[in-house]
Image: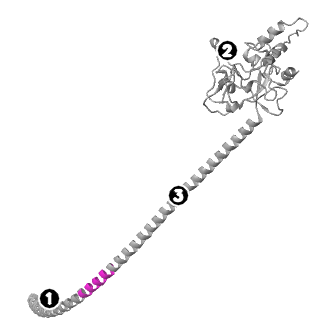
């Protein structure tokens, strides 16, 4: 049967029709009861299984089917305090599940999803309780109870399929806490009696959005690179301009230094010429002075030489006179000595 194939291939949440709670166990009687009601909702979600059980109890014993015992598939159960383990009342969302916009919204009676009438191609509000497309197959319109206790729900749009109509090859989504907590906090478990997946349109939209984001990121990266390139060009231009300004300043300083050196050399040359002239003038003056001094000195020297000559002659004459007087005295002393020797000389033995 479809329910058996759903249990074999549904994975987690595939046997949600036997979950505990207000829904009860879903069987053939419950399916017929849901099929009889035009918009009665899901047996597992809204409690439609109780009507099916009552209807089956009213049948004769020969028509009753033995109830099948189904094992409940493992699924994510949020950890809540004891005081909050009761089923929470639905708190509907503020934006349309189809277009993610606000405004006048139609609320689903089984889940927190809300929609615009135009997003559902409706012209007026439906009467009584209304369930959104998330709770019935898009192709055949069967609900959870009539589809074997399980639907395949898209996580990004109100698309749902039964097991028989579910397109093969679509990517299933694991019911992680990050995915389920926003809905569970509003009083609805989307993985109950359902397997989550991403439909082709949503996958294409995600891929398109991903590519668009990548393209925008690439453009932003290119813009950042272009901005960085322009900044570097501006910095390089400023550096080149500063270097050119510094080079011009250095060249101007070198030219000013060269002009100053030339001026100093010219001043030094002029000072050197004036000094040479002054030295020449002083030389000539000194030469004339030396000449005049030399002539006077020569005259003085000549006079001094004459005086020295005279003094030498006088000294020589005096020395000659003194020598003659000394010689005369020596002669006289010799004469007296001779006379004394002569008078007092006696022969030996006399």
Q: Position of residue 150 (x, y in %)?
A: 80, 22
The foreground one among 220 and 142 is 142
Tell me if residue 38 is in the magenta stretch. Answer: no
Q: Give the mark toward the camera: 3 or 2.
A: 2
The tag earlier along the polypeptide, 3 or 1, is 3
The foreground one among 107 and 229 is 107
Q: Main secondary structure of the magenta part?
A: helix
Residue positioned 72% across, 39% down in the render: 205
Answer whether labels 3 and 1 touch (C-beta < 8 Å). Answer: no
In the picture provided, is 2 more to the left or to the right than 121? Answer: right
Q: Where is residue 74 in the image (x, y as percent from the top left)?
A: 77, 19
Q: Give the mark toward the camera: 3 or 1.
A: 3
Name the image quarter holding the N terminus: top right
Range of residues picked out in magenta: 268-281
In the picture provided, is 92 more to the left or to the right than 197? Answer: left
Quick one: SS at disc 1?
loop
The tag earlier along the polypeptide, 3 or 2, is 2
Location of residue 294 (image quadrant): bottom left
Quick one: SS at disc 2?
loop
Q: Give the mark toward the camera: 2 or 1.
A: 2
Name the residue carrying label 1: 347
Q: In 3D space, how far apart are the residues under numbered discs 2 and 1 (Cα atoms)?
A: 194 Å
Name the residue carrying label 3: 234
Q: Is the residue 11 above or below the residue 280 in the image?
A: above
Name the residue carrying label 2: 87
Tell me if residue 279 is in the magenta stretch. Answer: yes
Residue positioned 37% across, 77% down in the render: 262
Q: Position of residue 146 (x, y in %)?
A: 82, 20
Q: How is the image coloured?
A: one colour
Q: Is the residue 331 above or below the residue 121 in the image?
A: below
Q: Is the residue 287 above or below the residue 6 in the image?
A: below
Q: In 3D space, how far apart are the residues under numbered discs 3 and 1 (Cα atoms)?
A: 147 Å
């Amino acid at each position: 049967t479809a329910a058996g194939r759903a249990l074999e291939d549904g994975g987690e949440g595939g046997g949600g029709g036997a979950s505990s709670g207000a829904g009860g166990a879903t069987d053939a009687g419950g399916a017929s009861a849901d099929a009889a009601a035009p918009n009665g909702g899901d047996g597992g979600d809204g409690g439609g299984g109780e009507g099916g059980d009552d209807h089956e109890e009213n049948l004769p014993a020969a028509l009753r089917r033995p109830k099948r015992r189904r094992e409940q598939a493992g699924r994510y159960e949020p950890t809540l305090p004891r005081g909050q383990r009761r089923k929470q009342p639905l708190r509907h969302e503020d934006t349309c599940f189809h277009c993610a916009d606000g405004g006048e919204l139609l609320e689903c009676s089984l889940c927190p999803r809300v929609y615009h009438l135009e997003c559902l191609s409706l012209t007026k509000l439906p009467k009584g309780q209304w369930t959104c497309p998330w709770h019935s197959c898009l192709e055949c319109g069967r609900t959870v109870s009539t589809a074997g206790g399980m639907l395949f729900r898209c996580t990004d749009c109100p698309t749902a399929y039964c097991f028989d109509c579910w397109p093969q090859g679509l990517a299933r989504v694991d019911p992680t806490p990050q995915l389920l907590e926003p809905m569970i906090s509003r009083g609805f478990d989307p993985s109950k009696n359902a397997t989550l997946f991403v439909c082709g349109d949503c996958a294409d939209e995600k891929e398109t959005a991903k590519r668009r984001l990548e393209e925008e990121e690439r453009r932003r990266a290119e813009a950042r690179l272009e901005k960085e390139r322009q900044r570097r060009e501006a910095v390089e231009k400023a550096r080149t301009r500063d270097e050119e300004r510094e080079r011009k300043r250095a060249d101007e300083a070198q030219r000013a230094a060269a002009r100053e050196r030339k001026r100093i050399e010219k001043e030094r040359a002029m000072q050197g010429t004036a000094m040479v002239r002054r030295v020449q003038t002083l030389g000539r003056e000194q030469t004339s002075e030396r000449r005049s001094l030399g002539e006077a000195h020569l005259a003085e020297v000549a006079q001094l030489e004459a005086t020295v000559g005279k003094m030498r002659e006088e000294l020589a004459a005096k020395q000659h006179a003194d020598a003659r007087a000394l010689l005369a005295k020596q002669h006289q002393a010799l004469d007296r000595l001779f006379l004394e020797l002569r008078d007092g000389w006696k022969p030996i033995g006399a």
